[in-house]
Amino acid sequence: MKKNIAIVMGGYSSEVNISLKSGNVVYNHLDREKYALFRVHILKDKWVALDDFEIEYPILKNDFSFILNDEKIMFDCVFNAIHGVPGENGMLLAYFKLLNLKHTSAPFYQMALTFNKRDTLSVLKESGIKTAISIYLNKGDDIDLNQIINKVGLPCFVKPNNAGSSYGISKAHTKEEILPAIEKAYKEDSEILIESFLDGTEVSVGVIQYKGEIKVLPITEIVTENDFFDYEAKYEGKSKEITPARISEKQKVNIEETAKKVYSLLNMSGFSRSEFILVDDEPYFLEINTVPGLTEESILPQQSLLAGISLRELFDTAIVDSLNKGI
């Protein structure tokens, strides 16, 4: 009998449209001979399942089911394609935990931890992972520009603490640019961090759970036309993503070892994509994405294809691994 699979997409954050694209790619690639597939839109104003004709069926939130032709459809597994809130911050996954419903992401606590940039950095620093120098601010805190510059220097990056897809991120080159950057970041989140600029090669590393093992995918080098790898560079063609990265064998080994260590230290499962800056031969960790983009053009699927893993196999393995492990 086919397993009922919910592909959840959408969300409550600025990344909703990116998530809808990712979810539809998963929906189009999975094997319909093996699974009964249902797209589920998790949106601020509605939770609905969609059939092939785009007809919407309200999700019953007491057990995450819906009624189709007078039959109650229950799910065997959820494929999480929600970038940002509530899929990537652990909120939705805590709900699934209460329902004993399996899903393709890491446990809810790990997802909540890694969605919080400052907490992730704190955990990894304690284990010897190199990172940029950083300052944390909460909305309402006093802002001492001289203190910020003395600690992190110029230029520096100002980032929302809980946001993805480079929303709200600015690179401040001068003292005068820091306050507008802080205001921009606060539009996305009430917590922000300010990080020192690292001068080196930016790389993105996919690490996944593949057939029960941790697998590091081919490394991608990021070459942006913009000042940094911002939203426009990521999604509007203002960058080159070169896979495999043009790096030395020593650098490759160092990045692979560090990315795998990060994945293990954070107790990840499922998909992840970590960003690093290579300073000389040493990788400095920037952040981890636990629900990375899954369109055909996205970085992790491109890395997967280069590793000889088709998108169908990539998505199928995530479901199989989830079904085979405990709640």
Image (cartoon, rainbow, N blue to C red):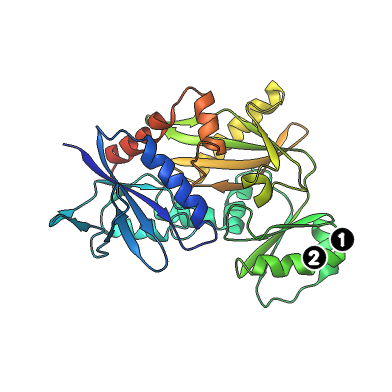
Q: Position of residue 112 (x, y in %)?
A: 48, 57
Residue 204: which quarter of the image?
A: top right
CB under 8 Å between discs 1 and 2:
yes
- Name the residue beneath numbered marker 1: 174
Checking the image for residue 178, the label placed there is 2
Q: Amino acid at mark 2?
A: Ile
Residue situated in front as seen by the camera: 131 or 204 = 204
In the rendered image, is residue 210 in sight? no
Image quadrant where one finds the N terminus: top left
In the rendered image, is residue 64 in sight? yes
Q: Secondary structure at mark 1?
A: loop
Left or right for 40, reference 239? left
Residue drawn at point x = 55 percent, y = 60 percent:
14
Checking the image for residue 145, the label placed there is none
Left or right for 103, reference 175? left
Q: Secondary structure at mark 2?
A: helix
Residue drawn at point x = 28 percent, y = 40 percent:
323
